[in-house]
Image (cartoon, grey):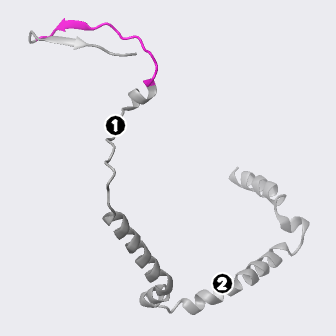
Amino acid sequence: MRDDIDRGRSEVLTTLDPEQMDPGYWHRFHRWVLNSAGAELVRRRRRADASVSDVMFSWWRTLVPTAVVVAILAGFFLLRDGTRPQQPVAYMSVDELILDGIEVPVMPAFETADSDGGIVVVNEAY
């Protein structure tokens, strides 16, 4: 039974094979991929023996000036005069954000006696 299913699957999948409509398709596709990737493969083959220090030294022309500019900007922002007073930050919970500006009825407060004799007050907004 398993062979019948595999045979049926292979028959269905052969209709999707481009080789059925265009003989030699896979050979041409393989040659096209290798020709297209040839320059990159040669470049990687040449760099295969490069060490970590070689790679790091190859980056110095862009990495060092960028790091200097970032350090100068960071120093400027840290040392600039903060004459403006900082505004206090108001934090809101998600419930407050959702219900902001919406009038909601408030449930009445319920007072019940606790098992210890204390009073429990419940007041929720819905």
Residue drawn where x is 43% and y is 30% of the image: 97
Badge 2 is on which residue?
40
Give the overall secondary structure of the magenta segment: loop
* Residue 103, picture quadrant: top left
Of pointers 1 and 2, the one earlier in the residue sequence: 2
The residue lying toward the viewer, choosing from 88 and 16, is: 88
Classed neighbour count for the residue bearing mark 1: other residues with Cα under 10 Å, few (<14), some (14–19), many (≥20): few
The residue lying toward the viewer, choosing from 16 and 96, is: 96
- State whether residue 121 is above or below residue 61: above
Q: Residue 42 colored magenta?
A: no
**Amino acid type, label 1:** Ala
Mark closer to the observer (1, 2): 1
The residue lying toward the viewer, choosing from 126 and 90, is: 90
Q: Where residue 73 appears, x then y in whole percent?
A: 40, 69
Number of numbered labels in the structure image: 2
Residue drawn where x is 80% and y is 74% of the image: 26
Badge 1 is on which residue?
90
Which stretch did the figure color magenta?
Answer: 99-115
Q: Residue 105 colored magenta?
A: yes
Q: Where residue 31 appears, x then y in whole percent?
A: 78, 81
